[in-house]
Amino acid sequence: MIHEIDEALRTLLAPAVTGDIAFDAPTRDWAARRNAPTLNAYLYDIREDVARRERGAHAERDAHGIVTRRRQPPRWFRLSYLVTAWTSRPEDEHRLLSGALALLLPHEVLPADAVPESVRPISTALPVSVAVPPAESRSLADIWSALGGELKPSLDVVITTPFPVTPVYGVAPPVTEAEIVVRGADGVPGDARPRIVRRTVGSDTRKGGGA
């Protein structure tokens, strides 16, 4: 699923650059090997969007409305990308970032044709946020320090997506017949034997019989 979101983001950013779109960690060594204008979308954080977590299981029914199995609801995750521009001149980098921002801002959700096939049965509305200040627990300066590079202008792009693989549980077959034990008023019928009434569920047909 993550690689499919990568490709969706690549599709959105492609018109902004005539060079490459990369997803590598922008380290010093990587930057030194660049020989063409590049937009880099580095996936630096993956965490669950707990506000979207649902409780309980969803029932799946057949054509007759009978529950055939139960499925746990999908879990949603926030994929955070550090989008940076790499050229030989700062002015060109700013131009690339401006183009990327112009392409991303109109979209509060991923365009329908960019939503991965694997998540479409769950949702076709995958939220996108651009340049929203990250949480206090995620300092961009710390990220650059961990990468061993110098701080650069960047766009923080977050795409929230469900993870399509969820546990599935089988269910027992539907009840089609029930048995009711009928006793006398004092708890024991006249013949000292309880009478069993069998009834087909959904029918008024009854059969009486001895134990």
Image (cartoon, grey):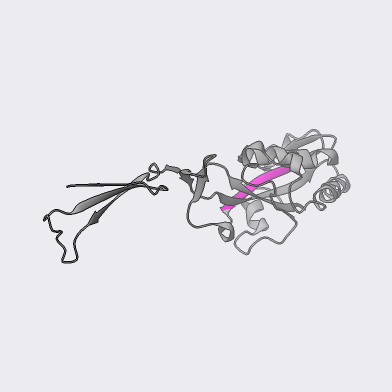
Q: Is residue 23 visible?
A: no
Vertical position of residue 32 compared to residue 192: above or below: above
Screen quadrant of the N terminus: top right
Occupied quadrant, residue 16: top right
Which residue is nearer to you in this view: 112 or 37? 112
How many numbered marks are there? 0
Q: Is residue 58 left or right of residue 127?
A: left
Q: Position of residue 123 (x, y in %)?
A: 65, 47
Q: Nearer the viewer, residue 75 or 25?
A: 75
**Residue 112 drawn at (x, y percent):** 75, 43
Q: Residue at x 71, y 44 (%)?
A: 41
> Does the magenta-highlighted stretch encompass residue 40?
yes
Q: Going by the image, does 172 lie left or right of 95?
A: left
Res 119 seen here: yes
Along the horizontal axis of the image, is 184 left or right of 43? Answer: left
Instruction: Please say if 127 is above or below 121.
Output: below
From which residue to which does the magenta span run?
Answer: 39-47
Q: Residue furthest bottom?
A: 186
Residue 194 placement: quadrant = bottom left
Seen at 19% across and 66% down, the residue is 185
For residue 111, side relative to residue 171 (left or right):
right
Residue 45 on image: x %, y % = 61, 50
x and y, in percent, of residue 19 in the image = 82, 34
Relative to the observer, which residue lies in front, 30 or 84? 84
Q: Main secondary structure of the magenta part?
A: strand
**Residue 44 included in the magenta stretch of the image:** yes
* Residue at left offset 48%, top offset 44%: 66
Q: Residue furthest front?
A: 190
